[in-house]
Image (cartoon, rainbow, N blue to C red):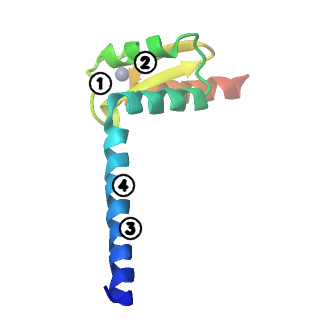
Amino acid sequence: MPYNKEIQKRSDDKRKDCLIRKEQLRLQALKPESIKRRVIRDWKKRGVVTNNYDKLYDDYLITNTCQRCENIMEGKGQNKKCLYYCNEFLIFVCNSCNWRLNRINIIMNNKK
Ligand SMILES: [Zn+2]
């Protein structure tokens, strides 16, 4: 194979490998265990402390109604499922309630 064609082929192969790897990573990220790891990592980053993150995650999965307004929690937007956490107080709420609770929190903290 001429030199230029050889280089071209190598670069095409590299691009193909890269696309395959990207697709593998995309599929990996959609796996339930990957999602679980990501959610728990986010909770930890936000300072959520519990002695059993697995149990908390299981509760998170089975809780489908907001523990404050009792609306069904699903998808994104106002009804998105959220974990409200403040000083070890922890409930699963819809995005709207989460927003309200955080507002109340900010106001209460300002009054102190
Ligand atoms: Zn709610």
Who comes first in sequence, dot 1 or dot 2? Answer: 2
Determine whether 102 is above or below 70 in the image.
below
Q: In which quadrant is the N terminus drawn?
A: bottom left
Residue 29 x, y percent position in the rendering: 37, 40
Determine whether 74 is above or below 89 in the image.
below
Cα separation, mark 2 vs mark 3, equals: 39 Å
Q: Amino acid at mark 3?
A: Lys
Cα separation, mark 1 vs mark 2, equals: 15 Å
Q: Nearer the viewer, mark 1 or mark 2?
A: 2
Residue 92 x, y percent position in the rendering: 41, 18
Marking on residue 57: 2
Q: Is disc 3 placed on a helix, strand or loop?
A: helix
Who comes first in sequence, dot 2 or dot 3? Answer: 3
Residue 38 x, y percent position in the rendering: 46, 33
Who comes first in sequence, dot 1 or dot 3? Answer: 3
The residue identified by callout 1 is 73
Q: Nearer the viewer, mark 4 or mark 1?
A: 4
Q: Amino acid at mark 4?
A: Lys
Residue at 43% from the left image edge and 18% from the top image edge: 57
Q: Residues within 10 Å of mark 1 (few under 14, many from 20)?
A: many
Residue at 32% from the left image edge and 38% from the top image edge: 30
Who comes first in sequence, dot 4 or dot 3? Answer: 3
Cα separation, mark 4 vs mark 1, equals: 31 Å
Q: Is disc 4 placed on a helix, strand or loop?
A: helix
Marking on residue 14: 3
